[in-house]
Image (cartoon, grey):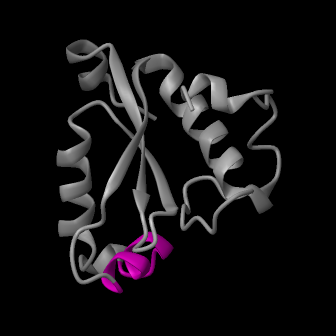
């Protein structure tokens, strides 16, 4: 969930994907700050003890440098970010081997309102 402090300061955000060495999307995230700054934070937190077990951090530690990223959607209204992030994860998890732990598609019922054409939302 987006914290209230961001709701007061920003009214839109972005959905982004971190890319593996072959240019495939490996992780999907949202941010209300600069995507470049958010990727920098992921990279710097990859060795933090309380995050070492996450699939994302394990994957990041296999890289020699910070991953490239792609912006999937910009200027998304902040109240829609969490739901659209779930939809993006569902959409891309069918196409790529994502390391997202936030919304595990095997847990069920996380995607009760599937977007029929997620490509249209993301301007692909």
Percent coordinates x, y for residue 102 in the rendering: 55, 55
| 97 on left or right of 112 | left
The magenta span reads 52-62
Quadrant of the snapshot with the C terminus: top right
Please report the residue visible at 51 percent of the width from the left and 63 percent of the height from the top: 24
For image coordinates 35% across by 73% down, the residue present is 51
In percent of the image, x 62 and y 48: which residue is there? 89
Left/right of residue 58 with respect to residue 33 in the rendered view: right
Q: Is residue 41 above or below residue 110?
A: below
Where residue 55 appears, x then y in whole percent? 49, 75
- Quarter residue 59 falls in: bottom left
Residue 20 is situated, as x and y percent measured from the top left of the image, at: 43, 70
- Look at the picture and state if 75 lies above or below 18: above
Residue 42, image x, y percentages: 27, 61
Question: Which residue is depicted at the point 45% across and 64% down?
Answer: 23
Q: Is residue 10 magenta?
A: no
Q: Could you tell me what secondary structure mostly forms the magenta stretch?
A: helix
Is residue 11 placed above or below 123 in the rendered structure?
above
Along the viewing direction, whichever of 1 and 93 lies nearer the viewer: 93
Q: Nearer the viewer, residue 9 or 71?
A: 71
Q: Nearer the viewer, residue 71 or 87?
A: 71
Count of labels shown? 0
Q: Is residue 35 left or right of residue 110?
A: left
Q: Quadrant of the rendered structure where residue 43 is?
A: bottom left
């Amino acid at each position: 969930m987006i914290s209230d402090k961001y709701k007061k300061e920003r009214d839109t955000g972005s959905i982004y994907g971190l890319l593996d060495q072959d240019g495939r999307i490996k992780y999907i995230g949202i941010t209300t700050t600069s995507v470049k700054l958010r990727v920098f934070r992921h990279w710097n937190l990859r060795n933090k003890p309380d995050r070492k077990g996450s699939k994302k951090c394990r994957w990041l530690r296999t890289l020699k440098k910070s991953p490239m990223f792609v912006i999937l959607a910009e200027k998304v209204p902040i109240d829609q970010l969490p739901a659209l992030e779930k939809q993006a994860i569902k959409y891309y998890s069918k196409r790529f081997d994502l390391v997202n732990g936030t919304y595990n598609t095997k847990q069920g019922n996380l995607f009760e309102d599937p977007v029929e054409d997620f490509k249209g939302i993301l301007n692909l």
